[in-house]
Image (tube, coloured by chain):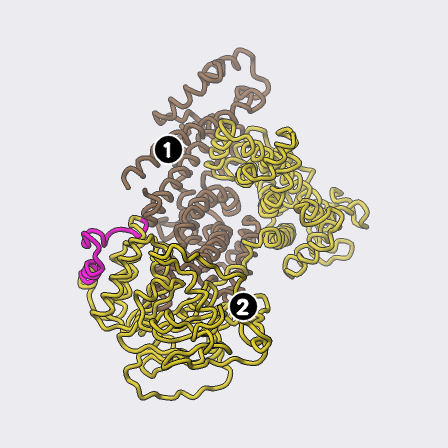
Chain colours: A yellow, B brown
């Protein structure tokens, strides 16, 4: 531990302060246990000369192979009557020493190669790295054997062999890190400050690659102990009378049947040491490189978890023209003990053939709302906390997974933002389309493929039959987005949810894709939920608009109402952000400040801190939606004033 | 695609050249006179000179290297003095035994490692994940030679289910069934560590992939979980696991040394250990270069399989 702790980056702790990282390490209970066991083993081995145990090399043929538990020989004796306990303590001492020396040697040499190679670059780097590649092209153990063959059997030679085969791991990892650092500002600054290459290397670069060295050490030290024990086991390492755990095992093997303890016990000790080293190593790695921490990668489940508070009454509705009715939808994310209420009591409905735009800044909850409709918000950390999503009167929030899967991609389809990451990179697009078709029908593979080509044709992909065999990375951004649209159309859905489908595209392509979506919607009479941050796009596409802020709906109305006569200060500010052709005099305005964190929303209006019209009344109580004209509502105390153009 | 494979094939040549250079230089470092190793400490100087001339050891190192490589290319690995037979014959015979063992272990580690990794990732933090993680931790910490001894003790000595050593029953009929019967314990022992490593990597690769947007797309299409996991996620995760499988192929080839010693398996690892103690240089050299070449070719295969799976690599 002292090595690992002392090597932590200087920025994070003074070398004297071991307390904090130790505490951090012990938070990982397994790593803490590994550390304790390892420390105990080390103490036992280091204090070997002071234990009241017999001389490990003293033979006593009269007491050969006495069983475990015999007084005087607690762990029995071996075939020469030597005390097993004493031999194990001394053997552990040798094994640990050899393992540590091999690790330190490999770490030192490998890191030096890596540092020099990465720092100086050029031909030196090339040569050194080719050499490292060569060494890595040999199977690990085979190289060790070859080196032992050349140097001859013996403990120190085995140690050399094991550290040589581990050098490449250090060299590679350290070089990678160094190359990244060399281009950073502080290295340039040091150079300008007149420091020489070697000073920079050891005072600026080395402290920053230390975590990598420690991580590599912690992952290889277990191997090195195992492998040196292995060479000794084969008779190529420790030579009699010196014994390490491996050679004890090797000798004991001959007595396996008559006296299993003689070989099993040293094996057990090796196992305990390596296991605790590995546990500790994992702990250190998690601590130094949180990115690799197993907990950091959480995998979303098949649907969003649902944790509804009070039971809700499913009220049927009479209006059969409404295809999707969302009531009091709430979605929260639990991250590190904080609850972020990304979507809060959101109500809206979409009629057949209608296009609803959902507008807001990033982080306002519009994408989360869209994903929540079909249970696609990742869990963990997300969950639906309230509300209903009624598709033709059927609640999707409480529907069984199987039912939900029947509806996804079939009656309700999605078009996602970035088609490069949302299409599977290793499956030809035609196959991905055919899959979408086959999931919800009884078409054969050939028929599905034909349908896929037809879909590509529909979204105007030239040479559809040929293009179907392409992979996503072989297509342009606009083409990929059309593939996304084609996939959504695969089963003639009733609702398409398009989440910023054109944000990743350039302007001309954007216009084409929008026109395509609009045309398909009108031809097929499907309802479209269009999520965007761009009011320009909204006025081109949508019948109605819903503006969201900090997880709440702040204004709804027809496109004309909201864009011409906004009733919420936030909407007005958003509209002011849209550049308008032919009005060069109108300067672009941005909204100062940022949307609030949804884990601690202020009381009252969430926009108040950024609002020029805010009064004291805005920061108390709950603010309801106010109607300003037919079907036009806004969540503002001064909605009528804003609506009439008052304020500024 | 074809150009990629061709490029990759061409790249093998310098690697093999480098390998031969490394192996040769290590062997050239051997202190002491090989002739004395052959003839014993009491050899006459004339005999030593004669043997050195016979082995070409009186020539300068570069010439020795070129002669050796030239001979290798024609399939002449020299003659083992301790066994008094051509090195290549011995190496081929022993390597085929190792290949059976390592091949079986590799298949086991690929199947169980991938399966355990996927299950572990899909059931993250669940009971199955915890059990697998613990098993993996034990698996990669246990010395394979000790595990082999334990398995022998339990399954061969106590239960008498499987034989404790050898590759075939020398008094029996032989045949594939007999080899498989002898193979069970050593193959399992050899595969444990590799399985653990593969499972660990598969788990993290799957976790990484399962968060990707295209998995959400698959779910948005209405795909069932089995399809999402195996057809979409596993396929993408496999690409990053395959190089690790290549490394594990080398690991089981090298790790076979212990297992062959524990189970008295007549493989190339045991041959090398014996050859090292008898200082049979040509045998060690030939064995190492042969196994290393095979390993390079395995990795070539791994790269090609990877490129077949991932169209982005080909271009």
Q: Chain of mark 1?
A: B
> Which residue is pictured at 47% across the width and 67% down the height?
A364
| In-image side of B115 versus A268 (left or right) | left
Badge 2: how crowded within 10 Å, few (<14), some, or many (20+)? few
Residue B124 x %, y %: 50, 64
Whether residue A262 is visible here, answered yes or no, is no
Asked which secondary structure carries label 2, the reply is loop
What residue is shown with label 2?
A: A612
Magenta region, residue range: A450-473
Q: Is residue B93 above or below residue B14?
A: below
Q: Residue at 78% of width from left, 54% of height from top?
A: A72
Residue toward you, B49 or A379: A379
- Rounded to the nearest angstrom, the CA distance separating label 2 from label 1 is 67 Å
Counting from the top left corner in percent of width and height, residue B45 is at 56, 12
From where the camera sits, is residue A160 visible? Answer: yes
In the rendered structure, the residue with mark 2 lies on which chain? A
As displayed, is residue A196 above or below residue A613? above
Magenta span includes A456: yes
Quick check: A7 left or right of A410?
right
Give the number of the mark in front: 2 or 1. 2
Secondary structure beneath disc 1? helix
Numbered badge on residue B11: 1
Q: Is residue A121 above or below residue A543?
A: above
Would you say the magenta stretch is mainly helix, strand or loop?
A: helix
Label disc, if present, on residue A151 of the rendered structure: none
Q: Residue furthest top?
A: B46
Q: How many marks?
A: 2
Q: Position of residue B55 (x, y in %)?
A: 46, 18
């Amino acid at each position: 531990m002292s090595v690992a702790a002392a090597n932590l980056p200087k920025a994070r702790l003074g070398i004297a302060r071991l307390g904090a990282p130790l505490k951090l390490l012990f938070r990982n209970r397994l790593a803490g246990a590994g550390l304790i066991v390892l420390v105990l083993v080390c103490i036992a081995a280091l204090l070997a000369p002071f234990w009241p145990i017999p001389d490990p090399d003293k033979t006593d043929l009269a007491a050969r192979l006495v069983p475990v538990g015999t007084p005087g020989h607690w762990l029995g004796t071996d075939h020469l009557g030597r005390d097993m306990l004493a031999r194990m303590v001394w053997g552990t001492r040798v094994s640990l020493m050899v393992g540590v020396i091999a690790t330190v040697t490999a770490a030192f040499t490998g890191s030096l190669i890596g540092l020099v190679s990465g720092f100086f670059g050029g031909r030196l780097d090339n040569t050194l790295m080719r050499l490292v590649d060569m060494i890595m092209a040999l199977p690990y153990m085979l190289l060790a054997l070859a080196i032992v063959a050349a140097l001859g059997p013996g403990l120190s030679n085995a140690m050399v062999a094991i550290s040589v085969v581990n050098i490449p791991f250090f060299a590679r990892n350290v070089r990678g890190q160094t190359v990244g650092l060399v281009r950073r500002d502080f290295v340039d600054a040091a150079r300008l400050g007149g420091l020489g290459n070697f000073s920079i290397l050891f005072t600026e670069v080395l402290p920053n690659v230390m975590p990598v060295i420690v991580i590599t050490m912690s992952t290889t030290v277990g191997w090195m102990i195992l492998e040196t024990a292995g060479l000794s086991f084969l008779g190529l390492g420790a030579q009699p009378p010196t014994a390490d755990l491996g050679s004890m095992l090797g000798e004991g093997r001959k007595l396996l049947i008559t006296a299993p303890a003689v070989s099993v016990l040293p094996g057990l000790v090796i196992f305990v040491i390596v296991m605790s080293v590995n546990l500790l190593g994992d702990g250190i790695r998690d601590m130094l490189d949180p990115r690799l921490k197993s907990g950091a990668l959480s995998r979303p489940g098949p649907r969003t978890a649902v944790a509804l508070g009070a039971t809700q009454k499913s009220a049927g509705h009479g209006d059969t023209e409404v295809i999707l009715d969302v009531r009091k939808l709430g979605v929260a994310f639990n991250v590190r003990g904080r609850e972020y209420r990304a979507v809060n009591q959101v109500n809206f409905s979409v009629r057949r053939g209608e296009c609803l735009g959902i507008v807001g800044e990033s982080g306002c909850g519009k994408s989360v709302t869209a994903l929540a409709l079909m249970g696609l918000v990742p869990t963990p950390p997300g969950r639906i906390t309230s509300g209903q999503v009624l598709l033709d009167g059927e609640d999707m929030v409480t529907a069984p997974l199987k039912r939900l899967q029947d509806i996804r991609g079939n009656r309700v389809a999605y078009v996602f933002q970035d088609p490069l990451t949302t299409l599977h990179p290793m499956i030809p697009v035609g196959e991905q389309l055919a899959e979408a078709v086959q999931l919800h029908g009884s078409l054969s593979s050939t028929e599905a493929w034909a349908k896929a080509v037809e879909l590509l044709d529909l979204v105007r992909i030239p040479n559809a039959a040929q293009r179907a065999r392409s992979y996503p990375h072989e297509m342009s951004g606009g083409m990929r987005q059309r593939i996304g649209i084609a996939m959504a159309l695969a089963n003639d859905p009733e609702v398409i949810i398009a989440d910023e489908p054109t944000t990743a595209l350039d302007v001309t392509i954007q216009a084409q894709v929008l026109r395509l979506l609009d045309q398909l919607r009108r031809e097929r009479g499907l309802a479209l939920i269009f999520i965007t941050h761009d009011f320009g796009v909204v006025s081109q596409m949508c019948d109605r608009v819903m503006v969201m802020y900090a997880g709440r709906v702040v204004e709804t109305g027809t496109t004309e109402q909201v864009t011409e006569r906004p009733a919420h200060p936030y909407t007005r500010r958003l509209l002011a952000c849209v550049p308008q052709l032919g009005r060069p005099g109108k300067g672009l305005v941005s909204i100062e400040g940022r949307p609030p964190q949804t884990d601690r929303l202020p009381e009252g209006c969430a926009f108040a801190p950024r609002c020029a019209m805010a009064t004291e009344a805005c920061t108390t109580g709950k603010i309801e939606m106010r109607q300003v004209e037919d079907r036009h509502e806004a969540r503002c105390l001064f909605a009528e004033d804003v609506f009439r153009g008052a304020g500024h | 695609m074809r150009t990629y494979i061709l490029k990759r094939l061409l790249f093998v040549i310098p690697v093999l050249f480098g390998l031969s250079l490394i192996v040769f230089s290590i062997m050239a470092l051997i202190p002491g006179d090989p002739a004395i190793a052959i003839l014993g400490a009491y050899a006459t100087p004339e005999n030593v000179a004669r043997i050195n001339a016979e082995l070409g050891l009186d020539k300068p190192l570069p010439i020795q290297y070129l002669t050796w490589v030239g001979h290798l290319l024609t399939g002449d690995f020299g003659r083992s003095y301790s066994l008094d037979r051509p090195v290549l014959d011995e190496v081929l015979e022993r390597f085929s035994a190792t290949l059976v063992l390592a091949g079986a272990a590799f298949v086991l580690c690929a199947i169980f490692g991938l399966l355990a990794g996927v299950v572990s990732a899909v059931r993250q933090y669940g009971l199955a994940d915890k059990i697998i993680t613990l098993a993996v931790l034990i698996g990669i910490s246990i010395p394979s030679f000790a595990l082999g001894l334990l398995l022998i003790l339990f399954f061969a000595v106590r239960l008498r289910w499987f034989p404790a050593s050898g590759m075939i029953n020398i008094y029996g009929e032989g045949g594939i069934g007999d080899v498989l019967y002898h193979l069970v314990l050593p193959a399992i022992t050899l595969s444990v560590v590799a399985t653990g490593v593969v499972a660990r990597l598969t788990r993290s690769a799957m976790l990484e992939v399962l968060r990707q947007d295209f998995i959400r797309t698959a779910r948005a299409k209405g795909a069932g979980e089995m399809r999402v996991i195996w057809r979409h996620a596993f396929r993408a995760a496999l690409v990053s696991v395959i190089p690790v499988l290549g490394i594990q192929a080398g690991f089981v080839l090298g790790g076979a040394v212990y297992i062959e010693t524990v189970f008295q398996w007549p493989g190339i690892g045991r041959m090398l250990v014996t050859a090292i103690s008898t200082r049979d240089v040509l045998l060690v050299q030939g064995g190492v270069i042969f196994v290393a070449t095979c390993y390079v070719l395995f990795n070539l295969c791994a790269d090609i399989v990877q490129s077949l799976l991932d169209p982005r690599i080909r271009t």
